[in-house]
Image (cartoon, rainbow, N blue to C red):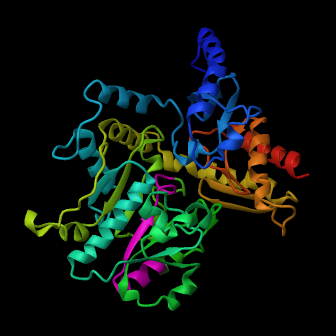
């Protein structure tokens, strides 16, 4: 690893002070802070990463089993991304995208659009994270219909158990009440369905602005897989009714499902494609909402016509983030990432069969290099959600060198693409040991 002995000693000595500062002044996401601030709880202080491995302030090493919340693609401290950021940093760290542009942003927009051979997605709106990428698409969809003389098309169609982010608009189309239910009265108008079978019961589809879906797999639902062909059928249903289609590829984009984008597998090309998480290789906050020339043209006009999309962020198209994203795309090409990922996906499937046989594993779900292992009292009986068995399994697995988080009682395994066979095998065995220790 990169640390010298002197640096190790310095970090270890500072550990207690860091923990005190954290407990007194921070507020962590999706975290019950009463338990976090309990004196008996020792937070994990991560200080270093290299490849698929993370290291904490005590010198312990872990496989990054969920790619630092589904963001890291090529591993930590990748020399090419490091160099790209340093090079851009020596030029300029940030400039406004309101009234000016910058070289990395222009080049990245061109490269992203070129990833679609049909050239149907031609415009890129940059933002900061997955929630804002969704927010952009939702607002564009509503304004598109307003500008077309159809202000009545202001509803959205979304799916049960979906998760699209936590900003006001993005949470409107979420389908997990525990995350967003208390704010429901403040949400956009949304109808929710469970499957394609429910499309027949959708009332007044001519007032629906857009449908939104996570293609192939629902992440926060516990890595739930959609049936094969479902996305293609949904796209055809939208086409017949003139409804816009928004694909949330915040998690699935950039190779996670085995292709650069999940929608490629069913040859579906949406009106809006939302990207974030892995776009910079897991280095810096950046997001992009891709759309078509047809959508873009409706916003063109004279200032007095008020067709402009009045939306943006201070750090939109940040040059450092765009430079990192360009380097990540270079890595895909130079290291033949997608081709080299195929045997690792097959190896993951083989190893997951060991978990599927466990009496406390209810189901194993895999989509490309994404896996969810759902545990229960037995294969038919879930644990009470308040017991947090999934979190306990992840805590136990950490002792065996794996760092990951659950979605309730579904253990997520989604390592960086650079993971070795030995590391992947060790991860599966760490999960097995964790389940044994907690569930048996």
Compared to residue 107, the image places residue 192 above or below, namely below
- Spot occupied by residue 274 in the image (x, y as percentages of width and height): 40, 59
Compared to residue 90, the image places residue 376 above or below, namely below
Compared to residue 415, the image places residue 119 above or below, namely below
Going 47% across and 77% down the picture, which residue do you hit?
Answer: 232
Residue 302 appears in view:
no
Q: Residue pushed farthest top? A: 6
Going 52% across and 42% down the picture, which residue do you hit?
Answer: 72
Judging depth in this view, the residue of 85 and 127 nearest the camera is 127
Question: What's drawn in magenta, residue-wise?
Answer: 234-255
Q: Check if residue 243 falls in the magenta segment.
A: yes
Judging depth in this view, the residue of 298 and 229 nearest the camera is 298
Q: Check if residue 229 falls in the magenta segment.
A: no
Instruction: Answer with the quarter of the image where residue 327 lies.
Output: top left
Instruction: Answer with the quarter of the image where residue 221 lies.
Output: bottom right
- Spot occupied by residue 264 in the image (x, y as percentages of width and height): 45, 65
Residue 201 appears in view:
yes
- Spot occupied by residue 402 in the image (x, y as percentages of width and height): 71, 39
Q: Is residue 24 left or right of residue 238?
A: right
């Amino acid at each position: 690893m990169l640390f010298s002995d002197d640096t190790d000693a310095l970090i270890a000595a500072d550990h207690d002070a860091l923990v005190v500062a954290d407990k007194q002044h921070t507020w962590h996401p999706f975290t019950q802070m009463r338990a976090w601030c309990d004196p008996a709880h020792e937070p994990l202080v991560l200080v270093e990463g290299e490849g698929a491995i993370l290291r904490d302030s005590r010198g312990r090493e872990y496989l990054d089993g969920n790619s630092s919340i589904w963001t890291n693609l090529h591993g930590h401290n990748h020399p090419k991304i490091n160099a790209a950021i340093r090079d851009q940093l020596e030029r300029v760290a940030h400039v406004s995208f309101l009234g000016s542009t910058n070289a990395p942003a222009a080049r990245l927009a061109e490269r992203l659009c070129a990833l679609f051979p049909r050239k149907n997605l031609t415009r890129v709106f940059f933002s900061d994270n997955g929630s804002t990428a969704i927010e952009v698409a939702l607002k564009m969809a509503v304004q598109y219909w307003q500008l077309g003389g159809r202000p009545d098309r202001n509803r959205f169609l979304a799916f049960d158990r979906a998760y699209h982010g936590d900003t006001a608009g993005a949470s409107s189309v979420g389908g997990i009440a525990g995350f967003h239910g208390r704010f429901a009265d403040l949400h956009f108008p949304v109808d929710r369905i469970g499957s394609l079978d429910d499309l027949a019961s959708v009332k007044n589809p001519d007032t629906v602005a857009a449908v939104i879906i996570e293609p192939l797999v629902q992440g926060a639902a516990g890595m739930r897989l959609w049936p094969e062909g479902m996305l293609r059928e949904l796209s055809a249903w939208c086409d017949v009714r003139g409804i816009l289609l928004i694909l949330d590829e915040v998690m699935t984009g950039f190779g996670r499902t085995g292709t650069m984008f999940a929608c490629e597998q069913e040859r579906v090309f949406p009106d809006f494609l939302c990207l974030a998480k892995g776009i910079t290789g897991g280095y810096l906050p950046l997001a992009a909402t891709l759309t078509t020339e047809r959508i873009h043209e409706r916003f063109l006009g004279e200032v007095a016509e008020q067709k402009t999309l009045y939306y943006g962020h201070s750090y939109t198209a940040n040059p450092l983030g765009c430079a990192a994203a360009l380097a990540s795309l270079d890595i895909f090409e130079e290291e033949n990432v997608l081709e080299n990922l195929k045997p690792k996906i097959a190896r993951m499937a083989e190893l997951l069969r060991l978990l599927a046989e466990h009496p406390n594993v209810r189901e194993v779900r895999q989509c490309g290099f994404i896996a969810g292992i759902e545990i229960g009292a037995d294969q038919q009986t879930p644990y009470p959600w308040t017991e947090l068995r999934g979190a306990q399994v992840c805590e136990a697995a950490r002792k065996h060198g794996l760092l990951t988080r659950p979605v309730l009682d579904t253990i997520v395994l989604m390592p960086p693409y650079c993971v070795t066979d030995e590391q992947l095998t060790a991860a599966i065995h760490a999960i097995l040991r964790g389940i044994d220790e907690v569930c048996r």
